[in-house]
Image (cartoon, rainbow, N blue to C red):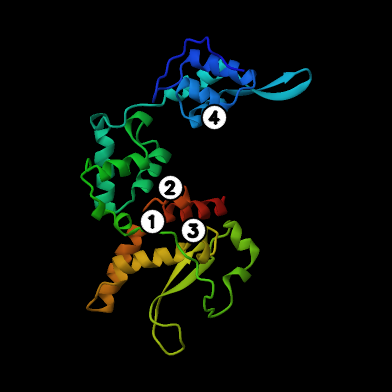
């Protein structure tokens, strides 16, 4: 069934208005396809599908529960969502947030994700006084920030190529998958993962190893997300690759590095630092 007598106009790259939503409601009720509706309105089918999802409500008709699209519901939801929308290119209105981000990156070596997550968790800035992580990276690539890509090592190093999992990996001991299932819950502090940073895995060579506490990391195996290996690689680039004149200078530098690392907010910890997680754990144990 076609509708030829309508007063809708083609408005490319514009939001649907209430009149167009009523038109969508009538066409859907009549059983017309999304493609036909999108063609008449001059919109993408994705726009129409999104609108149907936004304005769909549960109704009871003749004793049966059904989901129908209601134009008024779609318009109300749209208006509520628009309340939190603003022009993020107005850097002047978020200058204090940008300066705070640059300070965290330069002085404490935080990532954009850690900065935004920590600011949201601690309510340091209002919603209209800051931007999300993706917008910060857009600013970075547009050259609008004092921070450059070279200041964020993972940005210039990260490859967009799909990773390949090695099938025939040499096993040098008991599989990590055989550990107790209670460790996966991350409720108990004191379970560690060990990996070699420098040296070979034999009985005679001196090696440098690192320990990663499982409560402050994801409860998955290294082959699943590479958390341990990624952490060791970053440690190697930022610390272990340096040369030291004595063991004393090594220990002092290591203490400073560990203190900085353990006080950086991390996404995996819900934007808390490892020190905060450990402190809260032992406080709860005492309580």
Would you name the residue on which mark 2 appears?
Answer: 271
Q: Residue at x 41, y 83 (%)?
A: 200
Residue 80, given in percent of the width and then of the height, sits at: 47, 22
Question: SS class of the residue under badge 3?
Answer: loop
- Which of the two residues, 4 or 19, is positioned nearer the viewer here? 4
Residue 49: image tag: 4
C-alpha distance separating marks 3 and 4 = 38 Å
Q: Let me know if residue 229 appears in the view.
A: yes
Q: Residue at x 52, y 54 (%)?
A: 281
Left or right of residue 262, residue 166 in this image: right
Q: Which marked residue is nearer to the observer: mark 1 or mark 3?
A: 1
C-alpha distance separating marks 2 and 1 = 25 Å
The mark nearer the N terminus, 4 or 1, is 4
**Residue 128 position (above or below residue 186):** above
C-alpha distance separating marks 4 and 1 = 30 Å
Q: Let me know if residue 54 appears in the view.
A: no
- Which of the two residues, 159 or 268, is positioned nearer the viewer here? 159
C-alpha distance separating marks 3 and 2 = 12 Å
Q: Residue at x 43, y 47 (%)?
A: 271
**Residue 85 position (above or below residue 250):** above
Q: Residue at x 49, y 20 (%)?
A: 40
Residue 160: image tag: 1
C-alpha distance separating marks 2 and 4 = 34 Å
Q: Which marked residue is nearer to the observer: mark 3 or mark 4?
A: 4
Would you name the residue on which mark 3 appears?
Answer: 217
Which quadrant of the figure has residue 49?
A: top right
- Which of the two residues, 66 or 279, is positioned nearer the viewer here? 66
Residue 253, given in percent of the width and then of the height, sits at: 28, 68
Asked if labels 4 and 2 touch by Cβ distance under 8 angstroms, the answer is no
- How crowded is the residue under tag 4: few (<14 C-alpha within 10 Å), some, or many (20+)? few
């Amino acid at each position: 069934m076609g509708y030829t007598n309508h007063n809708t106009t083609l408005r490319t790259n514009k939001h649907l208005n209430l009149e167009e939503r009523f038109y969508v409601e009538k066409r859907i009720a009549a059983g017309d396809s999304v493609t036909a509706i999108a063609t008449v309105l001059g919109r993408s089918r994705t726009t129409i599908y999104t609108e149907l999802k936004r304005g769909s409500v549960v109704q009871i008709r003749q004793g049966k529960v059904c989901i129908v699209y209601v134009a008024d519901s779609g318009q109300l939801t749209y208006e509520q969502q628009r309340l939190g929308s603003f022009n993020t290119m107005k850097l002047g209105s978020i200058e204090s947030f940008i300066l705070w981000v640059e300070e965290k990156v330069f002085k404490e070596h935080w990532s954009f994700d850690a900065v935004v997550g920590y600011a949201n968790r601690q309510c340091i800035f209002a919603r209209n006084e800051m931007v999300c992580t993706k917008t910060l990276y857009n600013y970075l690539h547009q050259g609008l920030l004092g921070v450059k890509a070279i200041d964020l090592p993972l940005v210039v190093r990260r490859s967009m190529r799909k990773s390949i999992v090695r099938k025939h990996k040499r096993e040098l001991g008991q599989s990590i998958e055989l550990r107790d299932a209670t460790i996966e819950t991350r409720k108990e502090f004191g379970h560690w993962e060990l990996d070699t940073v420098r040296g070979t895995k034999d009985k005679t060579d001196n090696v440098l190893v690192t320990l990663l506490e499982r409560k402050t990391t994801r409860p998955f195996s290294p082959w699943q997300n590479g958390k341990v290996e990624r952490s060791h690689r970053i440690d190697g680039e930022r610390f272990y690759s340096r040369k030291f004149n004595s063991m004393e200078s090594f220990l002092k530098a290591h203490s400073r590095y560990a203190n900085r690392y353990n006080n950086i907010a991390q996404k995996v910890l819900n934007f808390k630092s490892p020190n905060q997680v450990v402190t809260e754990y032992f406080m709860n144990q005492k309580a």
